[in-house]
Image (tube, rainbow, N blue to C red):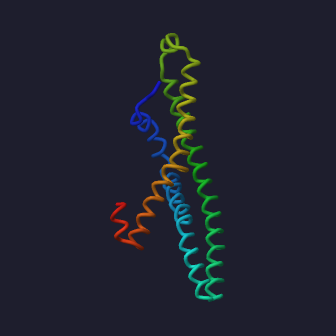
Amino acid sequence: MNLPAKLVFQAYWPSVKKFRWLAFAMVGLMMLTVLNKAASPFLFRGLINALTANSMESVALVLCGFVALHISTQITWYFYDLAIAFFELKAMRDLQQRCFAVVQTQSMRFFENSFSGSLVTAARRFCNNFEGITDAFAYQLGRAFFMMVFTLVVFAWEYPGLALVFA
C-alpha cells in the first residue's frame, strides 16, 4: 500500500516535533561535517602556496591545520552519529507508543473484522520506516543539500561570475 508522502510526513511530524532539539542538533552537526569536508581544499591550496614559497613555517602551520581539521572532523562525526541515534530511538519509541494507543482505542468489533496480525505488522513497518527516512535525510539528502549551498557560497566568494552561472 503506497501512501502519499504528505500523509506519511504528517504522521511522522508529531514525533519529530516532540524531539525538535535533537533534530536541530542533528542538522547543525550535519552542517559542521559538511563544513569540515569543504575546508580541506582550502588547506590544500595553502599547502601548495606554502611549498611554492619555500616557507617551512607556513608548511608546518598548514600541516597543523590538517591535523586540527582531522580531529574536529572525527569529533563532529562522533557527535553527529550520536545525535542521529538518540533522535531515531526517541522518535521511534514515541511512534510505537502512538500506534499502540491508537490500537487500544479500537473497538472489539474492529478486531473481529480485521486480522490483528496484519495490523501489528503494518504498525511495526510504519515505525521502522522512520529510521530509513531519517537515515536517507541525514546521510544523503541533507548532506548533499548543504554541500551544494556551501559550494555556491564558496563560488560566490572566490568567483562571483561563476556563482551567477550556477545560481
Q: In the rendered view of the protein, which quadrant contains the C terminus?
A: bottom left
Q: Which residue is drawn at 64% across and 58% down?
A: 78
Compare residues 63 and 159 and report the one nearer the observer. Answer: 159
The answer to whether residue 163 is above or below residue 19 is: below
Compare residues 119 and 54 and report the one nearer the observer. Answer: 54
The answer to whether residue 104 is above or below residue 64 is: above
The answer to whether residue 134 is above or below residue 167 is: above
The answer to whether residue 54 is above or below residue 103 is: below
Compare residues 151 and 165 and report the one nearer the observer. Answer: 165
Locate residue 17, reporting x and y percent: 45, 46
Q: Residue at x 58, y 79 (%)?
A: 48
Q: In the visual, does 4 lie left or right of 35?
A: left
Locate residue 5, reporting x and y percent: 42, 35
Locate residue 105, reporting x and y percent: 48, 23
Compare residues 31 and 89 and report the one nearer the observer. Answer: 31
The image shows a total of numbered marks equal to 0
Q: Which residue is drawn at 39% across and 72% down?
A: 159
Q: In the visual, does 117 lie left or right of 12?
A: right
Q: Which residue is drawn at 65% across and 88% down?
A: 56
Locate residue 89, reporting x and y percent: 59, 43
